[in-house]
Image: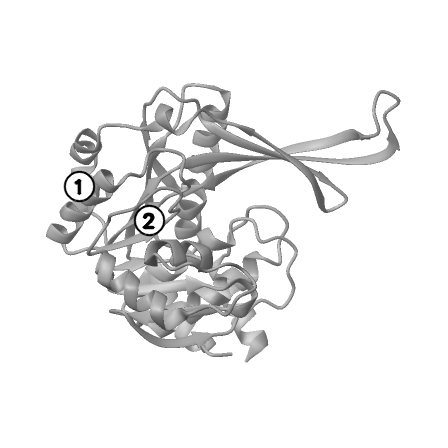
Amino acid sequence: MAISAAKVRSLLQRIRKKRILVVGDVMLDHYIWGNATRISPEAPVPVVEVARDTYVPGGAANVAVNCTSLGAAATLAGVIGDDSAGAHLRTELRARGVAAVPLKAEGPTIIKSRVILQHQQLCRLDREAPPEAYRLDPRAVARRLRTAVAASDAVIFSDYAKGLVSDELIAELAALARAAGCLTALDPKPKRPMHFSDLGLITPNRGEAAQLAGVDWRPGRPFPGEEICRRIHERHRVQNLVVTLSEDGLLLSREGRVLRQIPTAAREVADTSGAGDTSLAAIVLALTAGADLETAAHFANAAAGVVVGKLGTATVSPAELVAYVSQRA
């Protein structure tokens, strides 16, 4: 294993003193668990006999609960409506030790319902409004979060392209974060042109990185990592860049220069839902705890390796992380 159990324990000990502010697109992940033993006489579809329903925080909320599961203190700012999904989400956040700062917008709480049959996803049902319904005045949001930013060691922007995270919001909060001396990190979803700059860390996947760099790349082609990292730095002046490469691991870059590529740590993959949230939370926590980028990436890689072995949106505990690293030593 590229990171030792002793190093993981040391980082986890320092992480316990860190405070993280997560700002982004909040969701409630709803799982409908059941079985299907017959086909409907009304249409050629399975009849699902529901056994149980479970609810877990998703999207930016999953980033926040991954922070608390690893021992840090987390505050979450996102749109949470006065509806049943919002009530479920508030309950789940309290149970996981996340302090919520609900932001009010026109849109309802976003809920994603997944029907799971015998450990396989049958379909997903999304309830959400268009992005315009979740947009808020960036300056008003920054005023509300000024105190929370000042009290934090890092500000994470978790962008799922649902409407809250904008260039203006990133600029407002990043300026406050720099003044407070805390790390800024962004998981971008460049479905629109993005014009952020001077962040401490971004964690796009291959396709997102190519879009941010303005490089025409498609799956199946060789990934021009050096060119993409250089162009992203030229365009966005990002200090640290971690490109997630799915089964190929992580590509690490600092100030436009490729450092290295590290392989994935996953042994068994049951479900990749939320693994990116876990990786983002873990790498930010490790960086705030004093790790260099490569060590932080190995820490995050191991955390994601635990989570993808679980079904559904999940988190990793310190004990699970230490055990996972120890078994691979």
Check whether the beta carbons of the residues at disc 1 and disc 2 lie within 8 A of each other.
no
Label placed on residue 172: 1
Q: Is 56 left or right of 225, judged from the image as shown?
A: right
Q: Is 111 left or right of 229, judged from the image as shown?
A: right
Q: Is 118 left or right of 165, judged from the image as shown?
A: right
Mark 1–mark 2 Cα distance, whole angstroms, equals 23 Å
Residue at the spot 33% in from the left edge and 70% down from the top edge = 253
Q: Residue furthest left?
A: 179
Find numbered disc 2 in the image and state the secondary structure of the residue it sits on: strand
Q: Nearer the viewer, mark 1 or mark 2?
A: 1
Residue at the spot 23% in from the left edge and 54% down from the top edge = 153
Query: Quarter-wise, where is residue 234 in the image?
Result: bottom left
Q: Position of residue 281 (x, y in %)?
A: 39, 55
Residue at the spot 72% in from the left edge and 47% down from the top edge = 119
Label placed on residue 95: none
| Mark toward the start of the polypeptide (1 vs 2) | 2
**Is 173 placed above or below 237 here?**
above
Q: Residues within 10 Å of mark 2 (few under 14, many from 20)?
A: many
Q: Nearer the viewer, residue 221 or 198?
A: 221
Q: Where is residue 307 in the image (x, y as percent from the top left)?
A: 55, 57
Query: Quarter-wise, where is residue 287 in the image?
Result: bottom left
Q: Where is residue 13 in the image (x, y as percent from the top left)?
A: 35, 65
Find numbered disc 1 in the image and state the secondary structure of the residue it sits on: helix
Label placed on residue 73: 2
Q: Nearer the viewer, residue 149 or 317?
A: 149
Question: How many marks on residues?
Answer: 2
Q: Quadrant of the C terminus?
A: bottom right
Q: Residue furthest front?
A: 216
Query: Quarter-wise, where is residue 147 in the image?
Result: top left
Q: What residue type is labelled 1?
A: Glu
Residue at the spot 32% in from the left edge and 51% down from the top edge = 186
